[in-house]
Amino acid sequence: MKHFIFLFVVLANASIQAENALSTKHLEKVVIGAGCFWGVEKAYEQIPGVIDVVSGYAGGDGVDASYKAITALANRMNPKNHAEVVEVTFNSNEVGLERLLRFFFELHDPTQLNRQGNDVGTQYRSIIFVRDNDQKKIAQRVLDDYQVLLTRSGYGSVKTIIEDYKSFVEAESYHQDYLAKNPNGYCPDHSTGVSFSTQAASEITNDALLTGLHILVVEAQGYCPYCEKFRSDVTEKYLGSIPISYRTSSQLGGLTITTPTWATPTVIFLRDGREELGFKGYMSPKEFYNALGVVKLGNSDAFKVAFRDGTDPRYCREYEVFKNTPDGTFVDKLSGVALFDTRDRFNSKTGWLSFTKAIDGSVYRRLDYRFGMKRIEVRSVSSDIHLGHVFPDGPNGMPRYCINATVLDFVPAES
C-alpha cells in the first residue's frame, strides 16, 4: 500500500507540473468581422499582446469559402454567405478579450446592416464568433455598453451578431498582410468616433450603483499603465455576479466614497452606493479576490473554505442543492469562471460533490501536507481560492475531485 501511495504522489506531482506549465500558456483566439478584412487585420496587428492576425472566412453555409464565391453577385445579399473575418490570437496575460472587443466596436460602424460605407453585402456584416459561454458573456456586455454610448451620440441600434464559432477558413495568401504589401491599398475608416474612453462626466449617472453590491474601478482621465494592467490581469477575466463599473474621479457623483481616488486604479467595493472597502493602486488578482471574498462572502462557511482552506460539513445544504442539478457547469463563486461540468459529476456517497475531472485550465493542484496527511489540494486558477482535494479512487480508475459546494455557483446549460 505504501508503494502505491508513493507512486500516486510521484505521478500526481508530475501531473501538477505539467498542468501548471500549460497554465502559463495564456493564448486565446477570437474571430471577428468588421467589414473589409484588410484594414481590420492591420489594425489588430498593432495592439500589444496580439500574437497573430489572419484574414479569412466564417459563418457561411453552402457557399464556398473563397473570395471569388463570397463576392459573387448571387451571394451579395445571401444570409448564408461567409463573412470576411480575422482570427485574432492573443496573450490574455497582456491584453484581455474585453479590450479587444471594445476596439472592435470603435473600429467600425456596428449600426450598419450588411455593409460598411460603400462596401455592401452580407460578407461585410458586423459579427463576433464566440468559442464558449465566457466569451459570449463578455461580448454581450461590451455590446450593451457600446449601445448606451451610441444612443447618447444619436446613433441607432447595434446590428452586430454574436454567433457560436463553428469554423474558420484562412483566406487566399494574397489577402494576408495585404496593406503591408500594398501601403496605398483600400482601407476606409467607417468608425463612428464614439469611444469607450470619451464619456463626459455630465453623461454619467450612478443611479444603478445605489442598490446592491458593485465593484467600482476609478481610472485616470488619460493613459494609466497600471489601469491597463489591472484590466488585463483582473477585470477582463472576471465573470462574477457582482457587476464592475469604470469611472474617473470626476464621475463619482451621488456615491459615498472615503478612499482617496488620486492614485489609479482605485478599486472601491460599494454596497447600496456606499464604500464598504477601498484600495488605492494596482491590485493583483489574489488581492482583488481576497477583498471580493470579504465583501461577498463575509464571515460565512464559504469564506472559511475559500480563504482558510476549510471543509464543508458532509451533506451540507449546498451539497443537497447541487448534487442533482440539470446539465450545466459549476463556476467559481467569486470569479464566475467555469470549473466543473455536470457530465463529469458522479455520486461518491461521501457527502461532498465529486467529479472525475475539472474543466481544462480552470484549476491547479499542489501537494498538501497539513494535519499529518499527504494529499493533493485543488485550487481555482482564476481566484486562487481553495476548492477541495483530488484522490485516486474515482470510478474506473479515474480521479475523484472532492469539491466543497459552498465555494461554487451553478449555471444551467443553455437549452
Image: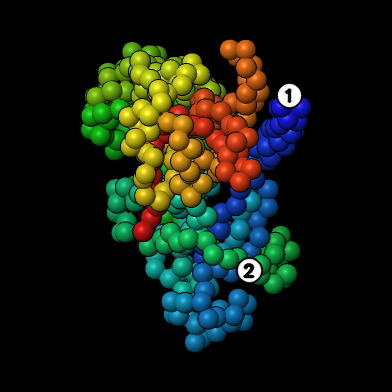
Nearer to us of marks 1 and 2 is 1
Q: Nearer the viewer, residue 116 or 214?
A: 214
Q: Is residue 22 visible?
A: yes
Q: Residues within 10 Å of mark 1 (few under 14, many from 20)?
A: few
* Numbered label attached to residue 339: none
The amino acid on which the numbered mark 1 sits, given as a three-letter code, is: Lys
Q: Residues within 10 Å of mark 2 (few under 14, many from 20)?
A: some
158 lies left or right of 139:
left
Q: Nearer the viewer, residue 220 or 368?
A: 368
Quadrant where the image shows the C terminus: bottom left
Residue 377 position within the rendered picture, expressed as x and y whole percent measured from the top left:
59, 26
* Quadrant of the image occupied by residue 242: top left
Residue occupying the point 45% across, 80% down: 78
253 lies left or right of 269:
left
For this orientation, the residue located farthest to the front is 1
The amino acid on which the numbered mark 2 sits, given as a three-letter code, is: Val
Residue pointed to by mark 1: 2
Residue occupying the point 49% across, 16% down: 308
Instruction: Tell me the distance, in whole angstroms, between the alpha carbons under discs 1 and 2.
Output: 53 Å
Residue 130 position within the rendered picture, expressed as x and y whole percent measured from the top left:
50, 56
Q: Secondary structure at mark 1?
A: helix
Q: Nearer the viewer, residue 242 or 37?
A: 242
Residue occupying the point 66% across, 60% down: 54
Residue 66 position within the rendered picture, expressed as x and y whole percent measured from the top left:
63, 77
Residue pointed to by mark 2: 169
Q: Secondary structure at mark 2?
A: strand
In the rendered image, the vertical position of residue 71 relative to residue 137, given as above or below: below
Q: Nearer the viewer, residue 40 or 289?
A: 289
343 lies left or right of 155:
right
295 lies left or right of 125:
left
Quadrant where the image shows the N terminus: top right
